[in-house]
Amino acid sequence: MKIIIDKETLVTALELITPITDKSSSKPILSNFLLTAVPGEGGAAGRVTLSATDYEISIEGSFPAQVSEPGTVCISAKKTYDVCREFISGEIGIKTDAQMWVTLEGGASRLRLPSVDIGLYPQMERSALPNRFRINGKALRRGFELTLMATQANETRKNLSGVCSRVANGEMKLIATDGHRLAQVLRPVEVLAGTEHPEIIIPRKSLLEMEKVLDRAAGDVEISHDARALVLTTDSVVVMTRLVEGKFPNVESVIPRDSDKTVLVNRERMITALRMVSTMSVDKIKPVKITLNEGLLRLETERAEYGDVGDEFPVDYTGGEFQTGFNAKYLLDVLTVADHGERIELNFKAALSPCLVKVPEDSNFLAVVMPLRLEW
């Protein structure tokens, strides 16, 4: 194999695939990636394909390159990425010798690595999946971002360790919850195949990798899936992932429908107050009391031997006095990610009722934060 590829193109490709390569010594073959070079036909430019897998998720990207001699090699992902990103040259040449050593050169810089038998590397198995739809890539990326913060980071309850997707009537509903907070986003889709799309749970790890791919995607992307696997296809990258087994809980009853106290707050001002108040709490739960009076919201921590802190600021609220308590971190997570509006709408009913969070400019997003019982 002998090719020349733009340095930034190669580094970008490696940035996508290197995070999923296995760094453990138990499966050393998975610390590598496959690089396949194919010459262009009829005067077209050649292409190189980079692919990697950890058995749970696979990523394959196709990129332009000057291909003098086609071929496939399997080499260390991390070593290649760490060295190539430091090359000063704008182009990188890659070639193999008879002993299947791989040499990468950029100007006066050079990296030489042994390759691995490509037959030992697991291949991406592609099969036609029955359910397929098209969606705007940036809208999907934003939907993942708005819901990921509500997923459970550990896997004590696997069905909460991802984002649930439901497609029906030309709409994709993304829902996530960890039992303490919930986030929901609606996105329009164009259904291409399948009449009854099954409810699926996309793993948190896969969503984080798909976000990186969608950052670089232009226009619409395609998603195909069945009950066990999902494939995301962009203009140059394909991501395949296994889905989380299990059933997502029915959370419709958790979303408040009858809140009678509505508060409009400046998002940045609320974030500043929550951060300040939560710094005084040594408790992992970080409890904060919210007191509402007409036109005013007050945040405060419990008085203790190490001190206390409070803050208040004007809000759009016309009801009577009302008090409730929440974990400051959960409120902060919601307000931080919901940055597509200057003001945030908070809806309450009773002291121990969930808080419904909305963005007035976006009717397709909502979040729910569960309350805390405060004894002070």
Image: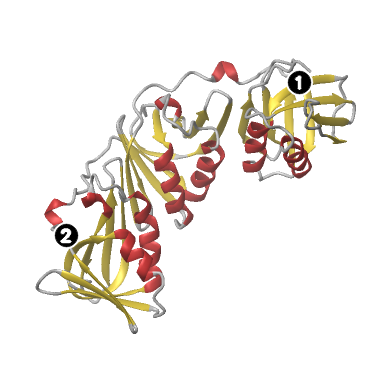
Relative to 257, is 327 above or below?
below
Q: CA distance from mark 2 to mark 1?
A: 61 Å
The amino acid on which the numbered mark 2 sits, given as a three-letter code, is Val
Q: Identify the residue shown where x is 37% and y is 29%.
A: 197
Closer to us: mark 2 or mark 1? Answer: 2
The amino acid on which the numbered mark 1 sits, given as a three-letter code, is Thr
Mark 2, residue position: 116
Quarter residue 65 falls in: bottom left
Of the residues under marks 2 and 1, which one precedes in the sequence?
2
Q: Nearer the viewer, residue 303 or 187?
A: 303
Q: Residue furthest front?
A: 305
Q: Colour mode?
A: secondary structure
Q: Position of residue 45 (x, y in %)?
A: 28, 73
How many marks overall?
2
What kind of element bears circle 2? Answer: loop
Mark 1, residue position: 324
Q: Nearer the viewer, residue 350 or 64?
A: 350
